[in-house]
Amino acid sequence: MSASAVIFYILSFFILTTGLLAVTSRKIFRSAIWLLFSLTGIAGLYFWLQMEFIAAVQIVVYVGGIVVLIIFSIFLTQQSGKDLPAPVRSRAIFSVLAVCAGFILTCLMLRQYAFGAAGTIAGPGQSVAGTGNPAGGAALAVDVSVGNIGAQLLSTSEHGYVLPFEVISILLLAAMIGCIVIAIKTKPEAK
Amino acid sequence: MSQIPLSHILVVSTALFFIGMYGLFTRRNMITMLMSVELILNSVNINFVAFNKYLYPDKLEGVFFTLFIIAIAAAEAAVAIAIIINLYRNFHSIDVEDAGEMKF
């Protein structure tokens, strides 16, 4: 087992453990901190996959933005030292059963498909036929540098993503205005 | 990286997805439910990046979908927290069982 594989399994264990602690911890502030660790571990997984830009975006937006927002809202809405109520026992048992059933079902479906080494997917009972790339797809791998991503993101040619880019900027503007409208304090005479 | 088959990464992201589902089922606090939703979105992002890296290394579509999902998750978290703070002002609780009426 090479060092790369060891790093992958350590990262996966870290992500899953901290994720599980984030959804089961009884103190809400600790739960937010476990979520922070889990998101950082996912950024490490992106680094391991050699997607440095995605990892940077993950750290900036999730770890630097969303988790801080969640921690702010925890402090605004409740006492962080108080324990959360334990989940109802029957609901917890049935949730565990449903989640385990779903996980096993998905893993069984994953085993049905043999993912080829380079760009080939074989369905159940099919032979591996070339769908996109010839073998040795790593040789013709496009570089995922920031310049390349930005050029394709803003290009207006056939595989350009400029229209979704503009749509998502409108969405962010709408979300910002919506947040201000929702969270604004109503005047006392209005109520 | 090439020693790990794609299915191992998919199993990890599936496990993370169902951890988020467990949190969504059992938690009754709105902020913790929002945190579970973030876990679910992240597991989907891992899938997109892994498929892009392993199956279509000559394209960038998975990267773009991941970027858009991250942007939408940020917008969704901001709106959800604004709603949660407004609910806290009206009900003095952020438990979903206490928010019994929609118009205040």
Image (cartoon, rainbow, N blue to C red):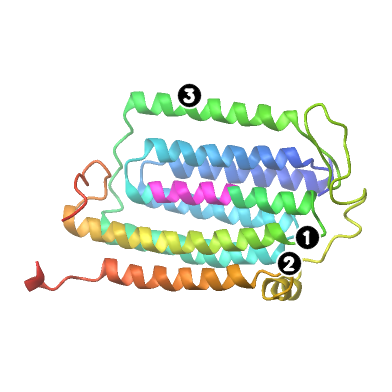
Going by the numbered disc 3, the residue's amino acid type is Leu
**Which residue position is annotated with label 2?**
A159
In this view, the residue in front, A178 or A35, is A178
- Label count reads 3
Q: Residues within 10 Å of mark 3 (few under 14, many from 20)?
A: few
Q: Give the position of the N terminus of chain A as an image quadrant.
A: top right
**Which residue position is annotated with label 1?**
B59
Q: Secondary structure at mark 3?
A: helix
Q: Which residues are magenta?
A: B33-43
Q: Which mark is residue B17?
A: none
Q: CA distance from mark 3 to mark 2?
A: 43 Å
Residue A122 picture location, percent across and down: 81, 35
Residue A173 picture location, percent across and down: 44, 74
- Left/right of residue A97 with respect to residue B6 in the rendered view: left
Q: Nearer the viewer, mark 3 or mark 1?
A: 1
Residue A81 picture location, percent across and down: 30, 50
Q: Nearer the viewer, mark 2 or mark 1?
A: 2
In this view, the residue in front, B62 or A91, is B62
Parent chain of label 3: A
Marks 3 & 1, CB-CB < 8 Å contact? no
